Image (spheres, rainbow, N blue to C red):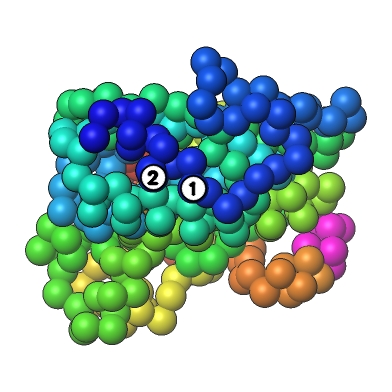
Amino acid sequence: MDEFGIVDRFFKRQSVRRKDVSLGIGDDTAVVSPSDSRKLVVTTDVLVSGVHFPEYTEPASIGHKVLAVNLSDIAAMGGVPAWATMALVLPQADERWLEEFSSGFFALAEQFDVQLIGGDITSGPLSVSIQLIGVVTDDGYLTRSGACRDDVIYVSGTLGDAALGLKIVKKELIAPKADRAFFLDRLNRPAPRVKLGSAIAPYATAAIDVSDGLVADLGHVCESSGVGAIVDVACLPVSACYRRCLSKVGWEPAVAFGDDYELCFTAPEDNTPAIERLTKELNIVVAPIGRITGDTMQWMHGDQRFPIHEQGYRHFR
C-alpha cells in the first residue's frame, strides 16, 4: 500500500463525526468551526520508538498512548478536546500493525469525542506525532502560573506505577504476575484526566500534567507562579501494587519519575469542599500532598527532609 491507501483503509474509518468539522481527511487542509465564545488550545507530542515506548510495544497501546499524552495536556488546561492531526512515520506498511494501531487510537478518540481530521504518513524509523486541538471558555482555562501562597497542592490518581512498569520492561524489577500486568498497563495505556481538568477549572489556580515526574512538573508550576512549595512524600497517592514493592523501590519513582499523566493542581483551601464533591461525582481519587509557600521547594517525609536524587525526565542531558 502507498500512503493514500493506508489513509483510506485505516484512518478514514473512524466513528466520530463532529458537527463542527466542515472538511476532514482528504484535502490539503481540514476546516473546523469553533464557537465564537470559546478559545482554542493546541498541543503537540511525538512518541519515538525506543525512547517513549519499547520497540516491541503492542501497536494498539502505541495508538492509545500517543493520543492519551496529548489529551493529558488538554486536561491540564481545563480544556475539552475536539480535533486531531497525525504525522506517522513507518518503517514499512504492515497491515496488521496498522489495523491494531488505528484501533487503539480510535477507541480512545471515541471515548473523548475526538475526530482525526488530517495528517501525513511517510517512511522511516517508527515515530508518531499528534497535534490535538481543544476548546476552553474565555475565563475557564488553567495555566501553570496562577498558584498562590497557601494554596493546597493536589495530585490525582496514583503516582509511580508507570515508572515501575518501565523497570519491569528493563528487567530492573521482578513483581508478582498481577502487579506486573497492572504496572505495564499504566505504562502503556495511561488514563488522561480530561473530565477532571474541565471540572476543577473554576476552582483551581494552576495545573500541570505529571508527564516528566512530580519533582520536575510541580517545579514548573512554582517557577511560573513565582512561589515555593512544601510537599510531604508520605502523602503521595500510590497504588496497592506499588506499596507491595515499596521496600524494593522506595519513594523515588513516585516522586521523580514520569509517564503517570495524572494532574497536579493547586487551589485555595476554601475550595476544598467543591473539589471533594466533584472528584466524588467523577469517581476519581484526588490527594492533598502539600501547600504552596512563598519561598523554596521543600520535600519532606513526615518531619524529616526527603533527599531528591532525580530531577525528572529530560530529553537532552
Residue picked out by circle 2: 10
Residues tagged 1 and 2 counted as in contact (Cβ below 8 A): yes
Q: Check the picture and name the quadrant holding the N terminus.
A: top left
- Which amino acid, by three-letter code, is at mark 1? Arg
Estimate the x, y position of residue 149 in percent, counting from the top left.
Answer: 73, 41
Whether residue 160 is visible: no
Q: Is residue 294 above or below residue 246?
A: above
Q: Is residue 270 magenta?
A: yes
Image side of residue 212 versus residue 16, left or right: left
Q: Is residue 153 above or below residue 83?
A: below
Q: Is residue 215 above or below residue 112?
A: above
Nearer the observer, 218 or 291: 218
Estimate the x, y position of residue 248 in percent, counting from the top left.
Answer: 21, 73
Residue at figure coordinates x 28%, y 43% from the top left: 52
Per the image, label 1 sits on a secondary structure element best described as loop
Residue lying at the far left of the rendered structure: 171
Residue at figure coordinates x 14%, y 74% from the top left: 174
Residue picked out by circle 1: 13
Residue at figure coordinates x 29%, y 66% from the top left: 184
Whether residue 281 is visible: yes
**Main secondary structure along the magenta-highlighted residues:** helix
The magenta stretch is 269-275
- Which amino acid, by three-letter code, is at mark 2? Phe
Nearer the observer, 52 or 88: 88
